[in-house]
């Protein structure tokens, strides 16, 4: 393929030739070869394809077919009832209703009694927006046998021993007990991400195993996924033999309500390192981050070890992360999406250190970003804008000292997949031809990223060269 009339790093117009999945030539007025496809960039900025360093593909596909139960679509108990009633109407009486994105600001802490009033008789499960909690009504509890002997750590029970309908960190347990279902088709998700200019993703689901690895490879072979996929998962996740799917870090989830034994955590890190894999530690509280940093210090950090989220990073822990040389993959989009709730519910002492940006860079901590979709909006441009502006949905400024430049925000999504936070990839001869084409020069795009009045995100197209076939997504 020959891309003509593009802007590269502020220089325009330039032509870019792609061959054998690489950038083969860059210059002015390159002559078209016989039968060579041509794409006119029309002066738009040609960038390295974006890489979302933390999301959950199958959960995103499932969420798109689920009932939205939280802000901004659902903001109070009345609108929750309407949403669930709509979900009920579209399925048969015995079918599960699946909700997502619930947050307590909608209707408080829900248990089976409250859910029974909303949906009586039909099994209902709603996932909290954190991804850590499922909420069940009585019909769902009965379907799972939770009051007839079925149990697991993480099933909350009342004083009488009855299930309350709250299940913590039991995604795999729940999935195994539901009626057998195939993993969701990823075609719509792949197309959506490509429309944002995303050419690669890191799936950060902790229980990814051999079945998920095969499913990602099959989705790539069927062209449902247009992205390269780096897959985190269990210690038993096998190496991948597929050209577009690669095994990543061992994902370790830390939960402040049930911390693992410190020595056991260090042992798990050692085991991963001896197997040649880095670790990725889920840390959304100050205490979780302190534990993670201490365990990494005891185990000895391996290049590639990373902290996921780093939701609260006070200065003393920031210094330790810098000394350890670990990478941080954070979610600036949550400043926009959840910032108003943080201002109300997060301890005042922690608010200055929420989803930091500039602080990490000033401390020389390698920093990259993901959307955490479906728990965050999958549009990386909205996340970049949040990293630049630090504005909540209501316009409140959250952590003004953590603002990034548009270029630094873009770099959060253009570092190498296996080295998040390293120097951004470039459109250069010999580089992979996984590219993002904007419909405007970078000067216009950067102005939009730093403008609080913008309501529409930057439009982009994704160009992926694969096995002598070009996929161009408008």
Image: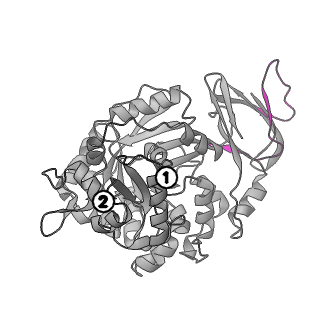
Q: Which SS type dominates the magenta stretch?
A: loop
Residue 362 higher or lower than 427, as above or below: below
Image quadrant in which you'd find residue 429:
top right
Q: Which residue occupies the extreme top position in the image?
A: 34
Where does the image place residue 107, in percent across and percent down from the top left?
41, 72
Q: Quadrant of the N terminus?
A: top right
Image quadrant in which you'd find residue 88:
bottom left
Residue at figure coordinates x 63%, y 62% from the top left: 385
Q: Quadrant of the C terminus?
A: top right
Colour mode? one colour
Q: Which residue occupies the extreme bottom position in the image?
A: 348
Q: Secondary structure at mark 1?
A: loop
Chain part drawn in magenta: 26-49
Residue at figure coordinates x 74%, y 63% from the top left: 447
Comparing marks 2 and 1, which lies closer to the viewer?
2
Q: Is residue 102 left or right of residue 392?
A: left
Which residue position holds label 1? 373
Q: Is residue 286 magenta?
A: no
Q: Is residue 318 left or right of residue 16?
A: left
Q: Is residue 92 left or right of residue 143?
A: right
Q: Nearer the viewer, residue 376 or 141?
A: 141
Where does the image place residue 32, in percent across and percent down from the top left?
84, 24
For disc 2, the neighbor class at 10 Å (few under 14, some 14 to 19, many from 20) is many
Q: Secondary structure at mark 2?
A: loop
Q: Is residue 253 left or right of residue 163?
A: right
Residue at figure coordinates x 48%, y 44% from the top left: 61
Check residue 137 in the rendering and tell me which mark sits there, or answer none: 2
Q: Nearer the viewer, residue 389 or 60?
A: 60
Q: Nearer the viewer, residue 183 or 51?
A: 183
For disc 1, the neighbor class at 10 Å (few under 14, some 14 to 19, many from 20) is many
């Amino acid at each position: 393929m020959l891309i003509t009339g593009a802007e590269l790093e502020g220089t325009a117009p330039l032509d870019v030739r792609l061959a054998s999945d690489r950038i083969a030539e860059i210059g002015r007025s390159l002559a078209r070869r016989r039968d060579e496809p041509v794409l006119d960039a029309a002066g738009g900025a040609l960038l390295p394809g974006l890489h979302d360093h933390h999301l959950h593909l199958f959960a995103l596909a499932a969420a798109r077919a689920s009932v939205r139960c939280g802000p901004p679509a659902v903001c109070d108990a009345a609108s929750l009832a309407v949403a669930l009633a709509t979900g009920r109407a579209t399925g048969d009486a015995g079918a599960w209703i699946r909700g997502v994105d619930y947050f307590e600001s909608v209707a408080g802490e829900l248990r089976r009694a409250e859910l029974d009033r909303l949906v009586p008789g039909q099994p209902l499960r709603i996932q909290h927006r954190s991804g850590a909690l499922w909420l069940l009504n009585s019909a769902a509890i009965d379907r799972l046998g939770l009051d007839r002997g079925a149990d697991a750590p993480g099933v909350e029970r009342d004083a009488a021993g009855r299930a309350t309908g709250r299940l913590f960190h039991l995604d795999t347990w729940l999935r195994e007990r539901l009626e057998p279902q195939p993993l969701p088709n990823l075609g719509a998700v792949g197309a959506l991400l490509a429309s944002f200019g995303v050419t690669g993703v890191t799936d950060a689901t902790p229980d990814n195993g051999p079945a998920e690895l095969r499913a990602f490879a099959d989705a790539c072979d069927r062209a449902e996924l247009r992205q390269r996929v780096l897959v985190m998962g269990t210690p038993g996740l096998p190496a991948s033999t597929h050209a577009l799917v690669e095994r990543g870090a061992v994902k370790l989830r830390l939960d402040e309500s049930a911390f693992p034994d410190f020595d056991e955590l260090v042992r798990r890190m050692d085991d991963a390192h001896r197997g040649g894999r880095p670790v990725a530690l889920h840390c959304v509280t100050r205490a979780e981050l302190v534990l993670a940093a201490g365990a990494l210090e005891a185990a000895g950090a391996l290049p590639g070890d990373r902290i996921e989220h780093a939701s609260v990073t006070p200065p003393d822990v920031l210094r330790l992360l810098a000394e350890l040389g670990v990478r941080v993959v954070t979610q600036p989009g949550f400043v926009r999406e959840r910032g108003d709730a943080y201002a109300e519910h997060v301890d005042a002492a922690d608010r200055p250190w929420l989803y930091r940006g500039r602080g990490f860079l000033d401390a020389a901590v390698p920093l990259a970003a993901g959307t955490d979709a479906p728990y965050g909006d999958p549009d990386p441009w909205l996340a970049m804008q949040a990293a630049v502006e630090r504005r909540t949905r209501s316009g409140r400024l959250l952590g003004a000292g953590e603002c990034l430049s548009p270029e630094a925000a873009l770099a959060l999504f253009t570092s190498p997949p296996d080295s998040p936070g390293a120097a951004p990839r470039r459109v250069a001869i010999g580089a992979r031809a996984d590219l993002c084409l904007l419909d405007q020069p970078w000067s216009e795009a950067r102005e939009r990223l730093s403008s609080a009045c913008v309501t529409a995100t930057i439009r982009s197209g994704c160009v992926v060269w694969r096995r002598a076939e070009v996929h161009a997504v408008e």
